[in-house]
Image (cartoon, helix red, strand yellow):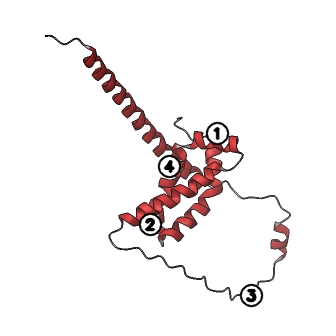
Amino acid sequence: MADEPPDDFVEFVTAHLAGLQREAVRLTGGSEQADEIYPAVLSDVAGHWRRLRWLGRWQRRDAAAEFLNRRLATRTKQWREDQIYEVDVRLLRPPPASHAALPASYALRKAALLPSTERVQIRPVAEAAIAWAHAWRRASWHRVARVATTVCLILIAFLQALPTAS
């Protein structure tokens, strides 16, 4: 796993970040709680990114988005189980829009004809980099654990193969 996120992962985060945050807020009932969940979900996706990208190409579907939704549901369930008190999430209807449509000015009508001045959003890039860094650190620790386990197993097998003195 590279230490920098690939461009397609950054594009994925850019496309799904707003929806992920809205869904996390809806599932937890508040933005403070959602801030605990969606970064963990993004790092889960980052940890499996290479496999998800390959699976998506092979099955010709968005495997990463499906995994994102499954991990969001799992992380939310884990979060609810960790709460001291029972969590009751109620959905409230948004208030109806009562303001009348304002007449468009000449500048607003011409804005559609001008080239866009919208800048690249830095938040999705930062969220992708943070999630990738967390996944990279977790992958590094998993690699260390695999090497240590392998060394222990080889050592045990070597000790078992030694002839015993009678």
Q: Quadrant of the C terminus?
A: top left
Q: Nearer the viewer, mark 2 or mark 3?
A: 2
Give the class, few, some or many, for how many residues have Cα within 10 Å of label 3's Cα (few <14, many ≥20).
Answer: few
Sequence-wise first label, 2 or 3: 2
**Which residue is the site of mark 3?**
100
Between the C-alphas of marks 3 and 4, the distance is 43 Å
| Residue 126 placement, left or right of 103 | left
Specify the amino acid type for callout 3.
Ala
Of pointers 3 and 1, the one earlier in the residue sequence: 1
As measured in the structure, the alpha-carbon distance from the residue carrying label 2 to the one carrying label 1 is 32 Å
Which residue is located at x 45 percent, y 38 percent?
139
Check disc 1 and report the residue beneath it.
Answer: 54
Task: Determine whether the residue tagged by mark 4 lies in a helix, strand or loop.
Answer: helix
Q: Distance of mark 1 from mark 4, alpha carbons?
A: 18 Å
- State the mark number for residue 33: 2
Give how far apart the Cα atoms at labels 2 and 3 are. Answer: 35 Å
